[in-house]
Image (tube, grey):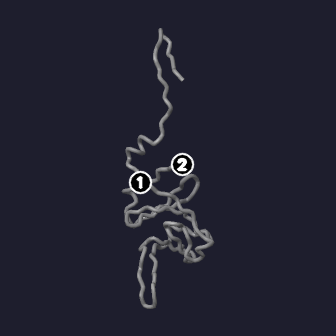
Amino acid sequence: MAKHVVAAARDLPPGSRKRFEVAGRSITIFNVAGEFFALLDRCPHQGGSLCEGQLIGLLEADGPGRYRYTRRGEIVRCPWHGWEFDLRTGRSYCEPARVRTKTYEVVMKDGRELVEGPYLAETFPVRVEEQYVVVEV
């Protein structure tokens, strides 16, 4: 898979989100407390923009009257019909066994790594012999 630089990390502070066009796909990057997540910006139910959805957490219970609010801001609720998706896995909380949205890996890299790039062009030794340039292959 090709890697694409979409923004400087400082342009996506914690609590923010932004939609990008990447290789013909609309992808939303979410920053939740300094951790980045990327989802295809299309609810698989009927196509609503997940970038416009509300970020919520999970209300969990281990017994009657014992509730905990966990995973604050890690679930996005589609603005059209309220379907909920886990930012980490893309799984739906409406039909988790069947429906999910596409997730993408997000990494932060130092600018030096991006400028220099991870790839190297193949090089060949070159020398001049009696006014001819010689390349060794």
Residue 68 occupies which quadrant of the picture? bottom left
Q: Which residue is mark 2?
A: 2
Look at the image and tell me in which quarter the C terminus lies. Answer: top right
**Image mark count:** 2
Residue lying at the far front in this picture: please name it: 62
Left or right, residue 42 beside residue 127: right
| Residue 58 percent across, percent down from the top left | 46, 78
Q: Residue at x 39, y 57 (%)?
A: 11
Local SS, label 2: loop
Residue 47 vertical position relative to residue 109 in the rendered view, above or below: below
Q: Residue at x 50, y 16 (%)?
A: 133
Disc 1 and disc 2: Cα gap in Å? 15 Å
Amino acid type, mark 2: Ala
Q: Residue at x 46, y 42 (%)?
A: 118
Check whether the beta carbons of the residues at disc 1 and disc 2 lie within 8 A of each other. Answer: no
Foreground of the two, 77 or 101: 101
Amino acid type, mark 1: Met
Residue 27 vertical position relative to residue 55 in the rendered view, above or below: above
- Disc on the earlier residue, 1 or 2: 2
Foreground of the two, 76 or 68: 68
Left or right, residue 112 beside residue 101: left
Foreground of the two, 55 or 107: 107
Question: What is the crowding at mark 2: few (fewer than 14 residues within 10 Å), some, or many (at least 20)?
Answer: few
Question: What is the crowding at mark 1: few (fewer than 14 residues within 10 Å), some, or many (at least 20)?
Answer: few
| Residue 55 percent across, percent down from the top left | 46, 72
Residue lying at the far top in this picture: please name it: 130
Find residue 108 and name its label: 1
Find residue 40 and name its label: none
Local SS, label 1: loop
| Residue 83 percent across, percent down from the top left | 56, 75
Left or right, residue 57 beside residue 27: left
